[in-house]
Amino acid sequence: MPNPLIFAVPKGRILDEALPLMARAGVVPEPEFHDKKSRALSFACEDADIRLIRVRAFDVATFVAHGAAQAGIVGSDVVEEFAYSDLYAPVDLDIGHCRLSVAEPAGQVSGVLPSHLRIASKYPNLTRRHYEQIGVQAEVVKLNGAMELAPSLGLSSRIVDLVSTGRTLRENGLVETSTILEISARLIVNRAALKTDGRVGQLVERFRTLVAQQKATA
């Protein structure tokens, strides 16, 4: 019997939205997966040929790109930030919608861009690319959380972060000033695995068909 196909999923909101779609595609975790007290990271599925791992979103891309997992689900922000050559995102799942945006203190918005900015973000590559395109040198201070504190404490003049409703920005005195990237969740696969493991191609087709059906009935 071949080794199980490893399917990587992120913790958080995308996973909540992805689970019903995964179930329809035949990726159904065993009950332990839903036990909030469990600290396990790897889980059996009803289909013994698939095993789930639950990790941080950025790590989903790393596991898949390096072939430790053959497939997974992650936001397009992660796909674009890392741009791994061995990572392929064949299906837009049309869930997990949000945006990657620039925000700054509400009282300091001027519309005039200096030649150099210090920006706090956990997306240094996307941030630098965005500002290079508009002729601004961006010094990125990498933070993994609490981004909204950076301007008020003098760490940066702006932040680049994920925005859904904008409520967190408003409650911290920030205003969204531009959008870098519209984001949705993607099915990602390892390129080599797609070529050598027929199960990966079958999985891609199942998800592709399900998304097409959803759009047709929407």
Image (spheres, rainbow, N blue to C red):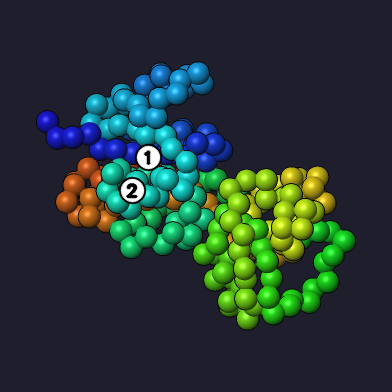
Q: Residue at x 61, y 64 (%)?
A: 140
Quadrant in which the N terminus is drawn: top left
Residue that mark 2 sits on: 64
Decide which of 131, 91 is in the foreground and name it.
Answer: 131
Q: Is residue 211 visible?
A: no
Task: Give the percent coordinates (x, y) of residue 130.
Answer: 59, 70
The amino acid type of the residue labelled 1 equals Ala
Decide which of 116, 126 is in the foreground and name it.
Answer: 116
Task: Give the percent coordinates (x, y) of residue 195.
Answer: 20, 55
Residue that mark 1 sits on: 8
Q: Are marks 2 and 1 in contact (CB under 8 Å)?
A: yes
Q: Residue at x 35, y 33 (%)?
A: 52
Q: Is residue 8 visible?
A: yes
The amino acid type of the residue labelled 2 equals Val
Q: Earlier in the sequence, mark 2 or mark 1?
A: 1
Task: Give the percent coordinates (x, y) of residue 98.
Answer: 61, 51
Kindly state the secondary structure of the residue where label 1 is placed.
strand
Neighbourhood count class around disc 1 (C-alpha, 10 Å): few under 14, some 14–19, many 20 upward: many
